[in-house]
Amino acid sequence: MSLSDHMKLLRARHGGVTPLEMQEVTGVPMHEVNLIEMKHRRIGEDDEMLGKLAAYFSVPLEQLQWHRERYRKKLTAALYERQDGGEPITLKLESGHQLSGPVSWFDRTAVALAQEGQEPIVVERHAVVDWE
Amino acid sequence: MNKLRSLREKKGLTLGQLSARASIPSRLINDYEIGQQLIPLPHAKLLAKALWVKVEDILPPANPPAGIATPPPAPPRPTPPAEQQMAAPLEDGHQAMPQEQRSYPPRPGWGSPPKPRGAKPPRPLKPKPEPIILPATEGQVQEIMRQGHRAGLSEEEIAAEVGKPLTELDRMQAREWIRNMRERAAGLSEEAKKSPATTRLPDDREPEYLTAQQKAGAIFSFTMFDGQIFTGQIKEYTPYTIVIDGDDGNDVVLRKLAIAYYQRVGTGNPLAVLAAAEHSEGHHDGELAPHKGEVAPPHAPAAVAGLADDGEPGVYGSDEHALRQEEDARRDDVADAPGEEPLPATASPDMGGHQGGSNDGVAL
């Protein structure tokens, strides 16, 4: 899961706190939070800022750094690679499920994994925590 | 006074009027009248037509019809004093021109002999200038280096490929190397299109899929972040929500951000499809369970070992995983305590307003 999606999830789990409310507490400008949530590329280089956010959400800094390395474009590149090679991909979801299959199609929001003898499973990309 | 002038005066025409009628310059007509020039036949015809006379009436008897015979030399006119030349008006009222100004050079096509067209002497061939070889500019050297770096070459590799120091290249060679390196860098960029930094992908595959399935009346089973499962036909969808027919006939609005994945389970009656799914075997991992209206706990058990039930991957280590499970268990205990409501696991702050409390059919 990208840092963008993880940040949204953390805000949701904290009662839907807004970036403005976070700014008042942490001092991290709200536009920085908006930027983190908006971008598909690798973002969140400032560890000091990430540390403040991690402290606010009571999560380890390493957790945010881990999600920072799994940005959305990286998943896209992996999907392209597997699709071109015709190899299956395994997606680990936030819900704890693990789904595998060849990439049938994908776009900015979802990935369809072909299933033998069944309809494809459409996975929302924001639910993908990791892949292999 | 020759015949032309007498005819013109007889007809009562001025030089200007005759000039306009015959389309011949009055200066030239004046020359004809005073015998300065012979009248060529074409002009004689024009003047005859303008004066309503025959051509023979205009041409002097000694002048053959062709009008190109050598006329008798005009008698030299006495040269008037300069003041008289300048001021002497003509009989028709026109200002006479000085003698010097009235002598015009012969015009081509107006009686002047054609220029002899002899073979031109061959031009001497100019020796080709020696090409000036200029050394490569500093900008060219820098551009070769820049494009080479773009192509993934180091300075040593670039120098090895060129075969000599870049500063010893001449300008044309440098231009060729710039083109070469640029093409190689462009070839690399084609490959790099699939790199994470430059990957682009379509936006509309999921809407296309949902539209097709909606038209087909397909029944889908949606698994949410928190493990809840909703099944029904897609009624409508937006980039943020999907509305399905609930079991009780009410619409259920599913937020896209709260959906983990979904799968088509059939068509027709959703309840019948669910019943068939209950009796089927061989569901894949994470396969759908029938939705019976109950709400699953916010953190469904992890289906795969090594993943924390909150979805965090196992990279934090197995010890951390166990700690996180305990922490989550405590969190669940607190959330279940009287007077407190559990936090919605998958609520989206962006969609606003549906966290906790009554959801009114809105899946969070």
Image (cartoon, coloured by chain):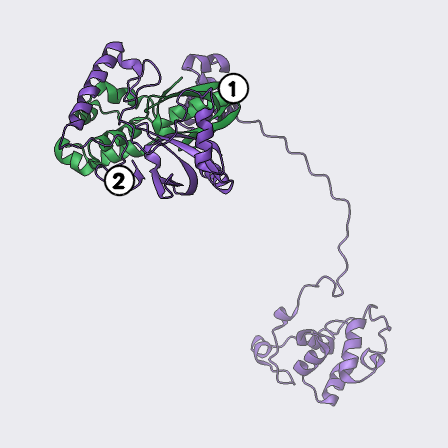
Chain colours: A green, B purple
**SS class of the residue under badge 1?**
helix
Disc number at residue A85?
A: 1
Instruction: Identify residue type, mark 2.
Output: Asn
Q: CA distance from mark 2 to mark 1?
A: 44 Å
Q: Name the image quarter holding residue B326.
A: top left
Q: Quadrant of the C terminus of chain B?
A: top left
Give the camera-side residue of B83 and B237. Answer: B237
Disc number at residue B359?
A: 2
Give the camera-side residue of A102 and B299. Answer: B299
Q: Is residue A86 left or right of residue A59?
A: right
Q: Is residue B74 left or right of residue B244?
A: right
Q: Residues within 10 Å of mark 2 (few under 14, many from 20)?
A: few
The answer to whether any part of residue B317 appears in the image is yes
Residue B205 screen position, x and y as percent = 47, 35
Q: Is residue A81 left or right of residue B346?
A: right
Which residue is pictured at 82% across the width and 68% down the height? B68
Instruction: Identify residue type, mark 1.
Output: Gly
Disc number at residue B244?
A: none
Give the camera-side residue of B109 and B147. Answer: B147
Give the answer, above or below, for where A70 lies relative to B362.
above
Residue A130 screen position, x and y as percent = 35, 20
Q: Chain of mark 1?
A: A
